Amino acid sequence: MTKKRMLFIVLGLLLLINAGCSGSNESRNETKARAKTETASVKTAQGNDRLPNIRILATGGTIAGANQSKTSTTNYKAGAVGIDTLIEAVPEMKDIANISGEQVANIGSQNMTNKTLLKLSKRAAKLLASDDVDGIVVTHGTDTLEETAYFLNLVLKSDKPVVVVGSMRPSTAIGADGPANLYNAVKVAASKEAYGKGTMVVLNDRIAAARYVTKTHTTAPDTFKSEEMGYLGNIADGIYFHNDITKKHTKDTDFNISKINQLPQVDIIYGYQNDGRYLFDAAIKAGAKGIIYAGSGNGSVSDEAKKGAVAAVKKGAAVVRSTRTGSGVVTPNPDLEKENILASNSLNPQKARILLMLALTKTDDPKKIQSYFEEY
Protein backbone atom coordinates (compact mmCIF):
# COMPACT_ATOMS: atom_id res chain seq x y z
CA MET A 1 0.00 0.00 0.00
CA THR A 2 1.46 3.39 -1.03
CA LYS A 3 2.04 6.18 1.51
CA LYS A 4 -0.37 8.39 -0.43
CA ARG A 5 -3.21 5.83 -0.21
CA MET A 6 -2.52 5.28 3.48
CA LEU A 7 -2.78 9.04 4.03
CA PHE A 8 -6.19 9.19 2.34
CA ILE A 9 -7.48 6.35 4.54
CA VAL A 10 -6.28 8.04 7.72
CA LEU A 11 -7.81 11.37 6.70
CA GLY A 12 -11.08 9.64 5.91
CA LEU A 13 -11.23 7.99 9.31
CA LEU A 14 -10.49 11.29 11.04
CA LEU A 15 -13.34 12.98 9.16
CA LEU A 16 -15.77 10.23 10.16
CA ILE A 17 -14.74 10.43 13.80
CA ASN A 18 -15.05 14.22 13.76
CA ALA A 19 -18.51 14.05 12.20
CA GLY A 20 -19.63 11.61 14.85
CA CYS A 21 -18.34 13.82 17.65
CA SER A 22 -19.50 17.18 16.32
CA GLY A 23 -22.83 16.14 14.80
CA SER A 24 -26.03 17.71 16.09
CA ASN A 25 -27.91 16.27 19.04
CA GLU A 26 -30.83 15.72 16.70
CA SER A 27 -28.76 13.47 14.41
CA ARG A 28 -27.44 11.46 17.32
CA ASN A 29 -30.96 11.09 18.73
CA GLU A 30 -32.26 9.93 15.37
CA THR A 31 -29.51 7.32 15.17
CA LYS A 32 -30.32 6.10 18.67
CA ALA A 33 -34.02 6.02 17.86
CA ARG A 34 -33.42 3.94 14.74
CA ALA A 35 -31.24 1.54 16.69
CA LYS A 36 -33.85 1.26 19.42
CA THR A 37 -36.60 0.62 16.87
CA GLU A 38 -34.52 -2.04 15.13
CA THR A 39 -33.76 -3.71 18.45
CA ALA A 40 -37.45 -3.65 19.41
CA SER A 41 -38.37 -5.17 16.07
CA VAL A 42 -35.94 -8.01 16.63
CA LYS A 43 -37.34 -8.64 20.12
CA THR A 44 -40.88 -8.64 18.77
CA ALA A 45 -40.00 -11.06 16.01
CA GLN A 46 -38.03 -13.39 18.28
CA GLY A 47 -40.25 -13.07 21.35
CA ASN A 48 -39.18 -12.95 24.95
CA ASP A 49 -38.72 -16.44 26.37
CA ARG A 50 -39.54 -15.15 29.84
CA LEU A 51 -43.01 -13.92 28.82
CA PRO A 52 -46.12 -15.96 28.00
CA ASN A 53 -47.39 -16.05 24.43
CA ILE A 54 -50.86 -14.55 24.10
CA ARG A 55 -52.86 -14.65 20.86
CA ILE A 56 -55.60 -12.05 20.33
CA LEU A 57 -58.52 -13.15 18.16
CA ALA A 58 -60.44 -10.12 16.93
CA THR A 59 -64.10 -10.18 15.91
CA GLY A 60 -64.87 -6.46 15.69
CA GLY A 61 -67.35 -4.69 17.96
CA THR A 62 -67.22 -1.35 19.75
CA ILE A 63 -63.66 -1.93 20.95
CA ALA A 64 -62.73 -1.70 17.27
CA GLY A 65 -65.29 1.01 16.53
CA ALA A 66 -64.58 4.48 15.16
CA ASN A 67 -66.33 7.78 14.51
CA GLN A 68 -65.22 11.21 13.30
CA SER A 69 -66.62 12.74 16.49
CA LYS A 70 -64.58 12.33 19.66
CA THR A 71 -67.60 13.13 21.82
CA SER A 72 -69.96 10.51 20.39
CA THR A 73 -70.14 7.24 22.30
CA THR A 74 -73.17 5.73 20.58
CA ASN A 75 -72.97 6.64 16.89
CA TYR A 76 -70.01 4.87 15.32
CA LYS A 77 -69.05 2.07 12.96
CA ALA A 78 -68.32 -1.17 14.80
CA GLY A 79 -65.31 -3.12 13.64
CA ALA A 80 -63.74 -0.19 11.78
CA VAL A 81 -60.30 -0.80 13.33
CA GLY A 82 -58.22 -3.90 12.59
CA ILE A 83 -56.34 -6.09 15.03
CA ASP A 84 -52.92 -4.60 14.18
CA THR A 85 -54.16 -1.12 15.09
CA LEU A 86 -55.65 -2.39 18.35
CA ILE A 87 -52.34 -3.94 19.34
CA GLU A 88 -50.33 -0.85 18.33
CA ALA A 89 -52.64 1.34 20.45
CA VAL A 90 -51.56 -0.49 23.62
CA PRO A 91 -47.79 -1.03 23.31
CA GLU A 92 -47.57 -1.65 27.06
CA MET A 93 -49.02 -5.13 26.47
CA LYS A 94 -45.64 -6.21 25.10
CA ASP A 95 -44.15 -5.74 28.56
CA ILE A 96 -46.33 -8.50 29.99
CA ALA A 97 -46.65 -10.95 27.07
CA ASN A 98 -45.53 -11.80 23.56
CA ILE A 99 -48.51 -10.54 21.60
CA SER A 100 -49.79 -11.75 18.24
CA GLY A 101 -53.18 -11.26 16.67
CA GLU A 102 -55.48 -12.30 13.88
CA GLN A 103 -58.79 -11.08 12.50
CA VAL A 104 -61.42 -13.82 12.72
CA ALA A 105 -64.34 -11.49 11.90
CA ASN A 106 -65.03 -7.77 11.85
CA ILE A 107 -68.66 -7.28 12.80
CA GLY A 108 -70.97 -5.79 15.37
CA SER A 109 -71.80 -8.61 17.77
CA GLN A 110 -75.52 -8.33 16.99
CA ASN A 111 -74.47 -10.00 13.71
CA MET A 112 -72.67 -12.92 15.35
CA THR A 113 -74.01 -16.07 13.69
CA ASN A 114 -73.65 -19.74 14.54
CA LYS A 115 -71.28 -20.08 11.58
CA THR A 116 -68.95 -17.36 12.87
CA LEU A 117 -69.23 -18.69 16.41
CA LEU A 118 -68.07 -22.12 15.26
CA LYS A 119 -65.23 -20.59 13.23
CA LEU A 120 -64.00 -18.63 16.24
CA SER A 121 -64.29 -21.59 18.59
CA LYS A 122 -62.47 -24.00 16.29
CA ARG A 123 -59.64 -21.54 15.78
CA ALA A 124 -59.35 -20.97 19.53
CA ALA A 125 -59.29 -24.73 20.16
CA LYS A 126 -56.50 -25.22 17.63
CA LEU A 127 -54.40 -22.47 19.17
CA LEU A 128 -54.93 -23.73 22.71
CA ALA A 129 -53.64 -27.14 21.64
CA SER A 130 -50.35 -25.55 20.56
CA ASP A 131 -47.34 -25.34 22.86
CA ASP A 132 -46.64 -21.91 21.38
CA VAL A 133 -49.80 -20.36 22.85
CA ASP A 134 -50.26 -19.84 26.60
CA GLY A 135 -53.57 -18.00 26.54
CA ILE A 136 -56.15 -16.38 24.28
CA VAL A 137 -57.91 -13.02 24.30
CA VAL A 138 -61.04 -12.54 22.17
CA THR A 139 -62.08 -8.98 21.34
CA HIS A 140 -65.85 -8.84 20.87
CA GLY A 141 -68.81 -6.50 20.69
CA THR A 142 -70.61 -6.24 24.00
CA ASP A 143 -74.18 -6.82 22.78
CA THR A 144 -73.80 -10.61 22.58
CA LEU A 145 -70.41 -10.97 24.27
CA GLU A 146 -71.79 -13.06 27.12
CA GLU A 147 -73.24 -15.62 24.70
CA THR A 148 -69.94 -16.16 22.88
CA ALA A 149 -68.06 -16.33 26.17
CA TYR A 150 -70.43 -18.97 27.56
CA PHE A 151 -70.19 -21.00 24.34
CA LEU A 152 -66.38 -21.00 24.58
CA ASN A 153 -66.68 -21.92 28.25
CA LEU A 154 -68.56 -25.09 27.27
CA VAL A 155 -66.64 -26.32 24.23
CA LEU A 156 -62.91 -25.55 24.66
CA LYS A 157 -60.94 -28.43 26.14
CA SER A 158 -58.08 -26.62 27.81
CA ASP A 159 -57.07 -25.19 31.18
CA LYS A 160 -55.26 -22.32 29.47
CA PRO A 161 -56.85 -18.93 30.10
CA VAL A 162 -59.41 -17.63 27.61
CA VAL A 163 -60.54 -14.05 28.14
CA VAL A 164 -63.29 -12.27 26.21
CA VAL A 165 -63.07 -8.48 26.23
CA GLY A 166 -64.90 -5.53 24.74
CA SER A 167 -65.61 -1.89 25.39
CA MET A 168 -68.60 0.39 25.72
CA ARG A 169 -66.99 3.34 23.97
CA PRO A 170 -65.44 3.33 20.49
CA SER A 171 -61.70 3.77 20.06
CA THR A 172 -62.13 7.37 18.88
CA ALA A 173 -64.17 8.59 21.86
CA ILE A 174 -62.92 10.74 24.71
CA GLY A 175 -62.38 8.38 27.63
CA ALA A 176 -62.38 5.26 25.44
CA ASP A 177 -62.33 2.21 27.71
CA GLY A 178 -61.04 -0.23 25.11
CA PRO A 179 -57.27 0.19 25.63
CA ALA A 180 -57.44 -0.36 29.40
CA ASN A 181 -59.81 -3.28 29.01
CA LEU A 182 -57.56 -4.91 26.39
CA TYR A 183 -54.46 -4.43 28.52
CA ASN A 184 -56.19 -5.98 31.52
CA ALA A 185 -57.49 -8.87 29.43
CA VAL A 186 -53.97 -9.69 28.28
CA LYS A 187 -52.71 -9.39 31.84
CA VAL A 188 -55.31 -11.92 33.03
CA ALA A 189 -54.68 -14.27 30.11
CA ALA A 190 -50.95 -14.16 30.88
CA SER A 191 -51.48 -14.96 34.57
CA LYS A 192 -50.73 -18.44 35.86
CA GLU A 193 -53.47 -17.92 38.45
CA ALA A 194 -56.03 -17.76 35.63
CA TYR A 195 -55.47 -21.37 34.59
CA GLY A 196 -58.41 -23.71 35.02
CA LYS A 197 -61.02 -21.01 35.65
CA GLY A 198 -62.95 -21.45 32.41
CA THR A 199 -63.65 -18.64 29.99
CA MET A 200 -63.54 -15.24 31.67
CA VAL A 201 -64.89 -11.81 30.77
CA VAL A 202 -62.76 -8.76 31.62
CA LEU A 203 -64.15 -5.22 31.52
CA ASN A 204 -64.09 -2.25 33.85
CA ASP A 205 -61.34 -3.68 36.11
CA ARG A 206 -63.39 -6.79 36.95
CA ILE A 207 -62.89 -10.46 36.16
CA ALA A 208 -66.11 -12.39 35.67
CA ALA A 209 -66.96 -16.00 34.88
CA ALA A 210 -68.63 -16.41 31.50
CA ARG A 211 -71.31 -18.52 33.20
CA TYR A 212 -72.42 -15.76 35.56
CA VAL A 213 -71.85 -12.39 33.88
CA THR A 214 -74.43 -10.45 31.86
CA LYS A 215 -74.82 -7.04 30.25
CA THR A 216 -77.14 -4.87 32.34
CA HIS A 217 -77.00 -1.36 30.87
CA THR A 218 -77.28 -0.04 27.33
CA THR A 219 -74.38 2.43 27.40
CA ALA A 220 -72.58 2.59 30.78
CA PRO A 221 -68.97 1.32 30.96
CA ASP A 222 -69.80 -0.75 34.07
CA THR A 223 -72.60 -2.60 32.28
CA PHE A 224 -71.28 -6.14 32.84
CA LYS A 225 -72.38 -7.48 36.20
CA SER A 226 -72.28 -10.69 38.19
CA GLU A 227 -74.49 -9.42 40.96
CA GLU A 228 -76.20 -12.67 41.91
CA MET A 229 -73.18 -14.99 41.81
CA GLY A 230 -70.26 -12.60 42.27
CA TYR A 231 -67.10 -11.86 40.29
CA LEU A 232 -64.08 -14.13 40.10
CA GLY A 233 -61.80 -11.22 40.91
CA ASN A 234 -60.70 -7.71 40.11
CA ILE A 235 -57.74 -5.80 38.71
CA ALA A 236 -56.04 -2.95 40.56
CA ASP A 237 -52.61 -2.88 38.92
CA GLY A 238 -52.27 -6.46 40.13
CA ILE A 239 -54.70 -9.35 39.59
CA TYR A 240 -56.78 -10.51 42.55
CA PHE A 241 -58.85 -13.70 42.33
CA HIS A 242 -61.42 -14.18 45.08
CA ASN A 243 -63.75 -16.95 43.90
CA ASP A 244 -63.92 -20.10 41.79
CA ILE A 245 -66.73 -21.17 39.50
CA THR A 246 -68.59 -24.24 40.76
CA LYS A 247 -70.35 -25.18 37.51
CA LYS A 248 -68.67 -27.59 35.10
CA HIS A 249 -66.80 -26.05 32.20
CA THR A 250 -64.18 -26.61 29.49
CA LYS A 251 -62.59 -30.06 29.99
CA ASP A 252 -65.43 -31.34 32.20
CA THR A 253 -68.30 -30.85 29.73
CA ASP A 254 -69.70 -33.30 27.19
CA PHE A 255 -69.17 -30.86 24.33
CA ASN A 256 -66.08 -30.73 22.14
CA ILE A 257 -65.89 -28.12 19.40
CA SER A 258 -63.77 -30.37 17.21
CA LYS A 259 -66.79 -32.68 16.85
CA ILE A 260 -69.40 -29.97 16.21
CA ASN A 261 -69.84 -28.67 12.67
CA GLN A 262 -73.43 -27.45 12.85
CA LEU A 263 -75.73 -26.13 15.56
CA PRO A 264 -79.49 -26.73 15.68
CA GLN A 265 -81.93 -23.85 15.51
CA VAL A 266 -83.05 -22.73 18.96
CA ASP A 267 -85.36 -19.74 19.31
CA ILE A 268 -86.32 -17.52 22.26
CA ILE A 269 -89.93 -16.56 22.96
CA TYR A 270 -90.59 -13.71 25.35
CA GLY A 271 -93.43 -14.11 27.84
CA TYR A 272 -95.86 -11.23 28.36
CA GLN A 273 -99.51 -10.54 29.25
CA ASN A 274 -101.95 -11.95 26.70
CA ASP A 275 -99.29 -14.04 24.94
CA GLY A 276 -100.46 -17.05 22.96
CA ARG A 277 -99.40 -20.34 21.43
CA TYR A 278 -98.91 -19.00 17.89
CA LEU A 279 -95.29 -17.97 18.49
CA PHE A 280 -94.47 -21.58 19.40
CA ASP A 281 -96.26 -22.80 16.29
CA ALA A 282 -94.37 -20.30 14.16
CA ALA A 283 -91.02 -21.32 15.63
CA ILE A 284 -91.65 -25.01 14.96
CA LYS A 285 -92.83 -24.24 11.42
CA ALA A 286 -89.61 -22.25 10.86
CA GLY A 287 -87.49 -25.25 11.84
CA ALA A 288 -86.76 -24.77 15.53
CA LYS A 289 -85.45 -27.85 17.31
CA GLY A 290 -85.52 -26.09 20.65
CA ILE A 291 -87.32 -23.17 22.29
CA ILE A 292 -86.36 -21.06 25.28
CA TYR A 293 -89.34 -19.40 26.94
CA ALA A 294 -88.38 -16.21 28.79
CA GLY A 295 -91.23 -16.34 31.26
CA SER A 296 -92.31 -13.82 33.84
CA GLY A 297 -91.21 -14.30 37.46
CA ASN A 298 -90.04 -17.84 38.17
CA GLY A 299 -90.34 -18.85 34.53
CA SER A 300 -94.14 -18.68 34.68
CA VAL A 301 -96.01 -19.90 31.60
CA SER A 302 -99.48 -18.63 30.76
CA ASP A 303 -102.20 -21.17 29.94
CA GLU A 304 -102.13 -20.22 26.25
CA ALA A 305 -98.35 -20.30 26.04
CA LYS A 306 -98.38 -23.70 27.75
CA LYS A 307 -100.58 -25.05 24.94
CA GLY A 308 -97.94 -23.94 22.44
CA ALA A 309 -95.10 -25.37 24.53
CA VAL A 310 -96.81 -28.74 24.91
CA ALA A 311 -97.54 -28.87 21.18
CA ALA A 312 -93.90 -28.06 20.41
CA VAL A 313 -92.68 -30.88 22.66
CA LYS A 314 -95.04 -33.34 20.99
CA LYS A 315 -93.52 -32.38 17.65
CA GLY A 316 -90.07 -33.26 18.92
CA ALA A 317 -88.73 -29.89 20.09
CA ALA A 318 -87.09 -29.27 23.46
CA VAL A 319 -88.66 -26.47 25.51
CA VAL A 320 -86.86 -24.82 28.42
CA ARG A 321 -88.25 -22.17 30.77
CA SER A 322 -86.04 -19.23 31.68
CA THR A 323 -86.95 -15.84 33.16
CA ARG A 324 -87.16 -12.30 31.87
CA THR A 325 -86.39 -10.88 35.34
CA GLY A 326 -82.62 -10.82 34.89
CA SER A 327 -81.56 -12.93 37.86
CA GLY A 328 -82.57 -15.81 40.08
CA VAL A 329 -83.03 -19.55 39.66
CA VAL A 330 -85.93 -20.92 37.65
CA THR A 331 -86.99 -23.87 39.77
CA PRO A 332 -88.53 -27.12 38.51
CA ASN A 333 -92.33 -27.17 38.15
CA PRO A 334 -93.84 -30.66 38.65
CA ASP A 335 -96.86 -29.98 36.42
CA LEU A 336 -94.68 -28.70 33.59
CA GLU A 337 -92.10 -31.42 34.09
CA LYS A 338 -94.82 -33.97 33.33
CA GLU A 339 -95.05 -32.34 29.89
CA ASN A 340 -91.23 -32.41 29.54
CA ILE A 341 -91.03 -28.64 29.79
CA LEU A 342 -87.66 -28.05 31.43
CA ALA A 343 -86.10 -25.39 33.70
CA SER A 344 -82.99 -23.30 32.96
CA ASN A 345 -81.67 -23.11 36.52
CA SER A 346 -79.96 -19.69 36.76
CA LEU A 347 -79.18 -19.26 33.06
CA ASN A 348 -80.76 -16.23 31.44
CA PRO A 349 -82.62 -16.77 28.14
CA GLN A 350 -79.69 -15.98 25.85
CA LYS A 351 -77.30 -18.32 27.65
CA ALA A 352 -79.99 -20.99 28.01
CA ARG A 353 -80.23 -20.91 24.22
CA ILE A 354 -76.46 -21.52 23.94
CA LEU A 355 -76.60 -24.53 26.24
CA LEU A 356 -79.71 -25.99 24.60
CA MET A 357 -78.09 -25.78 21.16
CA LEU A 358 -75.11 -27.73 22.43
CA ALA A 359 -77.28 -30.18 24.39
CA LEU A 360 -79.22 -31.03 21.24
CA THR A 361 -76.00 -31.99 19.46
CA LYS A 362 -75.71 -34.81 22.01
CA THR A 363 -79.23 -35.93 22.94
CA ASP A 364 -82.97 -35.33 22.71
CA ASP A 365 -83.66 -37.01 26.07
CA PRO A 366 -85.41 -34.42 28.32
CA LYS A 367 -83.88 -35.86 31.50
CA LYS A 368 -80.37 -35.67 30.09
CA ILE A 369 -80.94 -32.13 28.82
CA GLN A 370 -82.24 -31.10 32.25
CA SER A 371 -79.11 -32.54 33.84
CA TYR A 372 -76.99 -30.29 31.64
CA PHE A 373 -78.84 -27.26 32.96
CA GLU A 374 -78.22 -28.41 36.51
CA GLU A 375 -74.50 -29.10 35.98
CA TYR A 376 -73.37 -26.39 33.54
Image (spheres, rainbow, N blue to C red):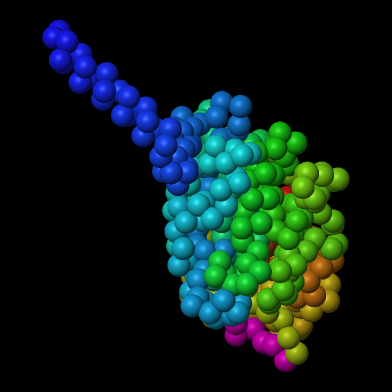
The structure residue drawn at horizontal position 73% and vertical position 60%, both measured from the top left corner, is: 204
**Overall secondary structure of the magenta section:** loop
The structure residue drawn at horizontal position 76% and vertical position 83%, both measured from the top left corner, is: 303
Q: How many marks?
A: 0
Give percent across and percent down for residue 102.
45, 49
Give percent across and percent down for residue 30.
43, 44
The structure residue drawn at horizontal position 53% and vertical position 41%, both measured from the top left corner, is: 99
Q: Name the residue furthest top.
A: 1
**Does the segment drawn in magenta span residue 275?**
yes
Give the magenta-colored segment's residue range. Answer: 274-279
Give percent across and percent down for residue 322.
74, 69
Q: Name the residue furthest bottom.
A: 274
Residue 295 in the image: above or below residue 334: below
- Residue 66 lies left or right of residue 274; in this view the side is left
* Observer able to see residue 38: no
Of 356 and 138, which appears nearest the observer? 138
The structure residue drawn at horizontal position 56% and vertical position 66%, both measured from the top left corner, is: 171
- Residue 5 lies left or right of residue 279; in this view the side is left
* Observer able to see residue 42: yes
